[in-house]
Amino acid sequence: MDDGHSKLHLYSLPNEVLGQILSSFPTRSLISWATVSRRFYALVLRILHYRLLIGAPLHEYKLILECFHPSSKLIEPHVFCTYLDTDGLEQLCGKSGSLRENSDTVQQLGRLSSVYSRFRPEVAVEERSSGTRLVPLRDDEHDPDRDNLIVTRPISLENFEDFSQLCVVVNIVKVMPGTNLLLSAHTVEDGVIRVFRDWLRDEEKRFREFVPDGTGPSQMLWVDQSKNVGIKVRVKAKPLMNQNVPILVHRDDDQFTSYELFIEEYAFESDTKGPVPEVTTQ
């Protein structure tokens, strides 16, 4: 065998060819391979960056959020989510849209793991007349008929319960252009959040006493311990249906355990659950 040919190996390939080979693999595989070498780091980072740029704005794909109590699985409607932004992507990659030159690749990949893509749950047009609870947003000035709507979910606790549960199911779906007709679906998250009584009480009190105009910061409820996926929420007490309440009962007493959860955003860590996993750089 020719000695010249015997010295050929994977790294003999130019970056363009090696990048095309890696581009055919899913994102999760690429992340695990990024530790092979610094050259793999650089190539994987470029591929992930490109997928983040082109993935979220694809109009033929949409993200559907289902958020419900286990007992309401069959009756709680799903909602489509509108892409808002991927925080930190511009700082990571620069305004030109390309990866910064002369930057530490390992540090770049580490920063990529803290980049979150954010989506706003939107009420579908056909659901507006079906009794779905709609709440106007205070900070939107563009289209009061469409954008000033926020999805809410009820949370109720019995006196003996310390927490309630919210099932969170997220699907990336391909839709027929110009419609919401589903052509295919891919589940990217299926988890359960425990919402504790004390947390609900504290958040409702903060919302009511410290930010009476509703402009204060929202809180994240994380689906997993790694904080890869979460929903941004606010809590508000539901109006009492029965006004015949004893005078000496305080509003903060535990018997008042019915709340509305305002679901403002859905967020996921961009290196674990990209908006379109099968998108490649080819």
Image: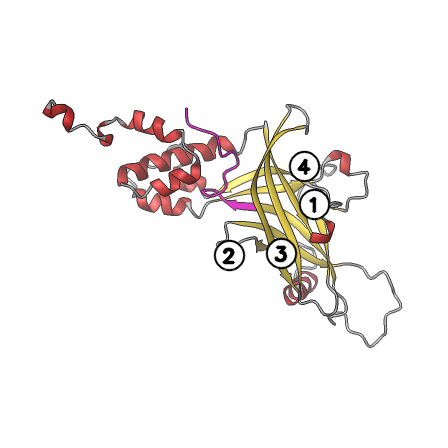
Using the numbered discs, state the Cα–Cα distance from disc 1 to disc 3 in whole angstroms.
16 Å
Q: Residue lying farthest left? A: 3
Spot occupied by residue 102 in the image (x, y as percentages of width and height): 28, 39
Look at mark 2 in the image and give the residue it sits on.
225
Dot 4 or dot 2: first in sequence order is 4
Dot 3 or dot 2: first in sequence order is 3
Q: Report whether 81 appears left or right of 133.
A: left
Using the numbered discs, state the Cα–Cα distance from disc 3 to disc 4 in whole angstroms.
21 Å
Dot 3 or dot 4: first in sequence order is 4
Using the numbered discs, state the Cα–Cα distance from disc 3 to disc 2 in whole angstroms.
25 Å
Q: Residue at x 33, y 41 (%)?
A: 34
Residue type of the residue flagged with mark 4: His
Q: Report whether 177 appears left or right of 46.
A: right
Q: Residue at x 39, y 30 (%)?
A: 23
98 lies above or below 247: above
Look at mark 3 in the image and give the residue it sits on.
216
Look at mark 1 in the image and give the residue it sits on.
150
Which of labels 3 and 2 is toward the front? 2
Using the numbered discs, state the Cα–Cα distance from disc 4 to disc 2 in whole angstroms.
36 Å
Tell whether label 4 touches label 3 (CB within 8 Å). Answer: no
Using the numbered discs, state the Cα–Cα distance from disc 4 to disc 1 in whole angstroms.
15 Å
Residue type of the residue flagged with mark 1: Ile
Magenta residues span: 267-282
Residue type of the residue flagged with mark 2: Gln
Residue type of the residue flagged with mark 3: Gly
Density class for disc 4 (Cα within 10 Å; few <14, some 14-19, many ≥20) is: few
Which of labels 4 and 2 is toward the front? 2
Spot occupied by residue 261 in the image (x, y as percentages of width and height): 69, 54
Q: Report whether 122 appears left or right of 22.
A: right
- Quadrant for the N terminus in the image: top left
Which of labels 1 and 3 is toward the front? 1
Disc 2, SS: loop
